[in-house]
Image (cartoon, helix red, strand yellow):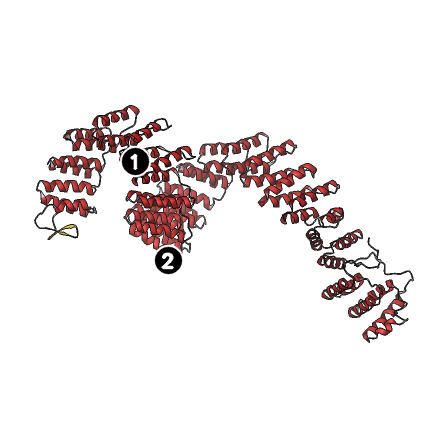
Amino acid sequence: MFVKLNFLNSRGFSSDSAKALAAGISKAIKEGNFNLLDSSVYGSNLQRNETNLVLLSLESEPNSALKYFRWAEISGKDPSFYTIAHVLIRNGMFDVADKVFDEMITNRGKDFNVLGSIRDRSLDADVCKFLMECCCRYGMVDKALEIFVYSTQLGVVIPQDSVYRMLNSLIGSDRVDLIADHFDKLCRGGIEPSGVSAHGFVLDALFCKGEVTKALDFHRLVMERGFRVGIVSCNKVLKGLSVDQIEVASRLLSLVLDCGPAPNVVTFCTLINGFCKRGEMDRAFDLFKVMEQRGIEPDLIAYSTLIDGYFKAGMLGMGHKLFSQALHKGVKLDVVVFSSTIDVYVKSGDLATASVVYKRMLCQGISPNVVTYTILIKGLCQDGRIYEAFGMYGQILKRGMEPSIVTYSSLIDGFCKCGNLRSGFALYEDMIKMGYPPDVVIYGVLVDGLSKQGLMLHAMRFSVKMLGQSIRLNVVVFNSLIDGWCRLNRFDEALKVFRLMGIYGIKPDVATFTTVMRVSIMEGRLEEALFLFFRMFKMGLEPDALAYCTLIDAFCKHMKPTIGLQLFDLMQRNKISADIAVCNVVIHLLFKCHRIEDASKFFNNLIEGKMEPDIVTYNTMICGYCSLRRLDEAERIFELLKVTPFGPNTVTLTILIHVLCKNNDMDGAIRMFSIMAEKGSKPNAVTYGCLMDWFSKSVDIEGSFKLFEEMQEKGISPSIVSYSIIIDGLCKRGRVDEATNIFHQAIDAKLLPDVVAYAILIRGYCKVGRLVEAALLYEHMLRNGVKPDDLLQRALSEYNPPKWLMSKGVWVHDKPMPD
């Protein structure tokens, strides 16, 4: 127990005699005459309490007081450490006080009475703080707490930071029991009203150390002893835990529900919010129901938190149900909740429901703000309803609101995407006049609009204008420019823009590389595309499914299926989720590699797994089996396709018609063609082409003509392949003039003949000896940018037309020929 301090002893030491005694002792100390202190005049008759009085009287001479303290300690006078600490601290000698405390520990051990035998009610807060911290430093946490408790009983207020350090020492020394024993005194000590409560401090510290059970036991002990704990303290702890220790927070909430204090709506909302952020909506809703069962009415925050959680989890039905429930119960939802709800439906493409929510908002008497209008404008623009969106923009101006940059960017983007660049740029000018400086997003939208319209010179000039206004170009702008040049087949220009990115210090993203890879692929440079693909990895980028699919498909089309399959294996190793489009390409690759069993296994895994095969998957399987003459397997897949929700389509039946024609089963092909008409599947140019090709190669060229005319009568535009089939049939029969007429019909139909069409007619001319016309047509082909293939070169080498030479595989002549 504590000894009360009192510097007036029973002998009634007078102030005059004290001063005289102090003066004499001080003089003796200064002279170094410690023998005098041992004499009867000063030392032998001096009582212990008088020793402390002497120390206080030497307050103005701390060095003398310190020397006297050390003499008194050696002489067994039992001087009070509190007293010498008081003298030293009052003189700012904290380091010396620390050293003296260390000496006391050395001389007396940790059990010495820190306050000594002095009895006085005028304790000093600074001295008590010092003593508490010294005790904590040496692990004397019980003595530190005793000093704190005694000082608070006498009304001395200890600074909060010292109390927190003491609590931390108690926790570190595993003496939480002492905190619980004196919890009421800690709360009265003045730390709770303006700082963290003792309860909250202890729980936070224990939870941070991972001592969850001790923390919960402490809470229960405090509650069982009847100490007052505010729910606000618990809420603060729960809020901290709900960020990354949600399970611990859940256990604490269960304890609060079991033994108190009584939770409020904030208590539940804190945990509900934590579960919502983790996507654990079932647990969040369970807490919501517990809150209602305990008679706590959910407020705006509770509803908005749970509604937002459901929406972010993609559970729109539950979110909307709660939204309606809140309105039905009379909860006054604000413009933020309505706007976020509208935003969810806009992002999901459900503009109809978004409109319903907007009208309901108006019925509730809640005025939309700029954010609300901007969300609706963005949704309407995405839906192509640009003029309705522009009407919303008018509402913003009419109500005296200021449109945001997002408002303008959404509208400008809407106008650009619908091809109305004039209105987009007019809105851009209005924005500048109203004092809104356009940002890189606005510029990016306009550059993209110009690029998609093929106005690449304007797009490039606009990009330069951005630089002139000190706006840093970003990767999105460069991607738009690269894509625009690619749309015009100006691949060299696209590559120049790609190289400019490095000059301006813009790091390409996956979309950039994928676009440039397409450029390389279209120009037949597969190795370069592969180099770009692996360059992404080197730059720390992770290729997405589209990048993989682009390259896999390219190797498939260029008859290099093995490399395509290796890329797919890499894709799986890197855990990139493949969509059904990628899977379809892989099946095609497996058939190209004659890995029939692997293709079948892959297909069966799709059927048994979570990813549903689509019509392309079935058609790829049927086509693959047909190409390898496994018609029984193709028929089996066809039967499976019949029972799917989508069933066979035109492509399916065309594949079967093609294989029947190749097998000279014309009756079966015609029968399949009739089934198409019965099932409502419209034949396309490829379907007719398969039949025309068979008729053309057989003796019935007229049958091919009839199909060609029938196709046109049904509004099916023939492709260049269709024309080539007719031209080939006519040329094989020596009817070159008719073939020439059909060739020009194709050109009149705005179809650019390919090397196959040219080669058929050139060979036809050569066969009938019309070599000059063959040469003119060859010249025409070269001028149109169509390169001769090996087959045409070999065919031409069989003939020896006069005045023509072969040079590097290309026909040349000694002088220009007329057009």
Calculate the distance from the C-alpha at mark 2 to the C-alpha at mark 1: 47 Å
Residue at position x 30%, y 24% in the image: 679
Residue at position x 15%, y 46% in the image: 794
Q: Is residue 551 left or right of residue 60?
A: left
**Which of 593 and 467 lies nearest the eye of the viewer?**
593
Q: Which mark is residue 355?
A: none
**Is residue 455 visible to us here?**
no
**Which of 445 and 391 lies nearest the eye of the viewer?**
445
**Which of 150 and 751 lies nearest the eye of the viewer?**
150
Query: What amino acid is labelled 1 in the image?
Result: Gly
The image shows residue 675 at horizontal and vertical percentages of 27, 25
- Kindly state the secondary structure of the residue where label 2 is placed: helix
Q: Residue furthest top?
A: 678
- Kindly state the secondary structure of the residue where label 1 is placed: helix
Residue annotated with mark 2:
503
Comparing marks 2 and 1, which lies closer to the viewer?
Answer: 1
Residue annotated with mark 1:
624
Depicted 576 relative to depicted 730: above or below: below
The image shows residue 713 at horizontal and vertical percentages of 22, 28
Q: Residue furthest right?
A: 11
- Find residue 37 and report its image quarter: bottom right
Q: How many marks?
A: 2
Around disc 2, counting alpha carbons within 10 Å, would you say few (fewer than 14), some (14 to 19), or many (20 or more)? Answer: few
Query: What amino acid is labelled 2 in the image?
Result: Ile
Around disc 1, counting alpha carbons within 10 Å, would you say few (fewer than 14), some (14 to 19), or many (20 or more)? Answer: many
